[in-house]
Amino acid sequence: MATQIVLLLLIIALVVYSVYLQVQLTRKNIFIETTVKRLSGIEKSRSIDEMMAFLGDIQKLSPNSSYFQSKILDEDTTDFIYENYSEMKTYMHYTMDEADAKNILANGFRFVDSFYKTALPVTKDNLDLKIKHDSRKFFGDFLVIICISIDIVNFYSKEMEKAGIKNHSFENILTELPPSKNENSDLTYQLSNKFIKGYINHKTGEIIKNPEFDPWYNAPAFKKNLETLRS
């Protein structure tokens, strides 16, 4: 008798589990069908507002919606990123550990050869920001914001052009330490920490500002770097 009861309970458990799996499969199928239909409609209308609404719906419909939650489009976050946008060249860099973000605030942003390998340019467009964020958010929860005044960018870009310097960009000039080689013998530069505006935890929305931030900073070392490259 006891054996029959155990078998009956086991059968009931298997039936319940089977129903649960069927429900999950149905939800996934509905999500896929809805996604395809929405994509098809957006492709025809090409409406930015629809695309933004669609991205929001994906977060709600996805079984893993908690994984996609982000504060990247919160007003406080975008206000911080876009502040004085017309006067700045703005970039964002993702890092996994907060200790690394704090180190960048204190010492500057290190990059190998090209600044743009890990720093994405920011445009004042929420859709563009969302797309770039979704492509890079897996590199870490901490988003470092880098801002350089357009005046500084234009000045050193023109000076490099006058000097005939073609194999470098203005970011290579804005370093206060001489370039060094890493373990792979790649040339490493360290952008001055004055151009680091701060960092954001894009999951919690917490913003840490750099008290030394000065996007118009123009150190004597920058002109020396220019002369070194010129010679």
Image: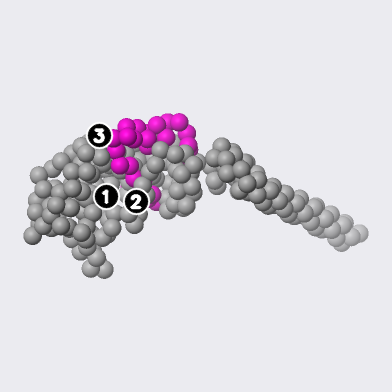
Q: Which residue is tagged 1?
A: 109
Q: Position of residue 98 (x, y in %)?
A: 36, 46
Mark 1: amino acid:
Phe
**Which residue: 54% across, 46% down?**
68
Q: Which residue is tagged 2?
A: 119
**Contact? badges 2 and 1 (CB < 8 Å):** yes
Q: Is 84 covered by the magenta stretch?
A: yes
Mark 2: amino acid:
Ala
- Left or right: residue 100 compared with residue 10: left
What colouring method underlies this structural image?
A: one colour
The answer to which of 91 and 158 lies nearer the viewer is 158
Q: Earlier in the sequence, mark 3 or mark 1?
A: 1
Mark 3: amino acid:
Pro
Q: Earlier in the sequence, mark 3 or mark 2?
A: 2
Q: Which residues are magenta?
A: 71-99
Q: Secondary structure at mark 2?
A: loop
**Contact? badges 3 and 1 (CB < 8 Å):** no
Q: Secondary structure at mark 1?
A: strand
